[in-house]
Amino acid sequence: MEPVTATLITFNEERNIEEALQSLAWADEIVVVDSGSTDATIEICRRYTGRVCQRAWTGYVDQKNHAVAQASHDWIFSLDADERVSPSLAGELYQLRRAGCERAGYCIPRVAFFLGRWIRHGDWYPDYQLRFFDRRRGRWQGGNVHESVRIDGAPGQLRGEILHFTYRSVSDYLRRLEVYSTLAARDYRQIGKTSSAIQVLGNPLATFLKCYLLKRGFLDGFPGVMVAVMGAISVYFKYAKLYELNRKPASER
């Protein structure tokens, strides 16, 4: 059976990390790269693995690639601290490893828990993530946000889910929005994207309609409304900040 190293990056994740580590009990090895936690994160991690290292924060892509580089095995399963491996996914991975992995990597559906229910429609589902891959044929790439694994060749697709315990509250979402929208605007500018008044106003509306109507977010009840609104707000701030950024003198960006 193909041995697997599970990798995580952490920073002050004492509320999340233990359940994430418990869901990785099937892995042959767990590697944690921490960027200076001041809470109990390190202590908790060391209960589950001796492979815990600390290094200064260098960005999502570099931290995750560093974790991959520390692994003893070539097949990697990457998990975030606010995620869990579902029992069905663990079983599917067992069967895949037993039969032999034919692809360089595999995409996995991710389902989010928000406002007391699993969100299975709209822009949040199935939210495929390439998290199981051969490091000899793939690595993490991307900008300041929305990092992803790129492999050579087409990925396979699994059915078992990653369980995502995302925003704990609307306030939690708003706190993170400030950071992520700024990073996203910088990424957009680096790849040459522009922003106009029409985009600042029109793109959020289009996002809401796509999420709530076309992707049937209404089937998730009132949380589905919230997810669609939050998606529209996120798009608004990304393009508003890009609009502002493009009009600043180069010395102020």
Image (spheres, rainbow, N blue to C red):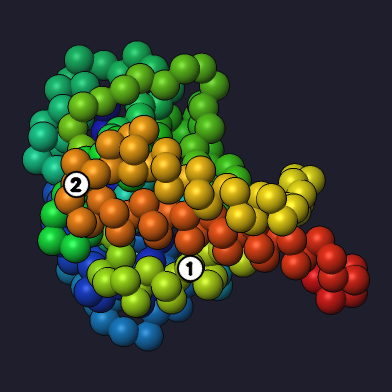
Circle 2 sits in a helix, a strand or a loop, which is it? Answer: helix
Q: Quadrant of residue 56?
A: bottom right
Residue 61 position (above or below residue 100): below
Q: Which residue is mark 1?
A: 177
Give the CA separation, mark 1 to mark 2: 22 Å
* Left or right: where 96 falls relative to 180: left
Image quadrant holding the N terminus, namely top left
At horizontal 19% and vertical 46% (from top left) the residue drawn is 220
**For mark 1, does the 10 Å Cα neighbourhood hold few (<14), some (14 to 19), or many (20 or more) residues?**
some
Front position in the image: 231 or 5: 231
* Three-letter code for the amino acid on which mark 1 is drawn: Leu
* Left or right: where 80 falls relative to 249: left
Q: Indicate the position of residue 18 as horizontal and vertical percent values.
A: 18, 66
Q: Which residue is mark 2?
A: 220
Q: Quadrant of residue 157?
A: top left
Front position in the image: 131 or 36: 131
* Three-letter code for the amino acid on which mark 2 is drawn: Asp
Residue 101 position (above or below residue 24): above
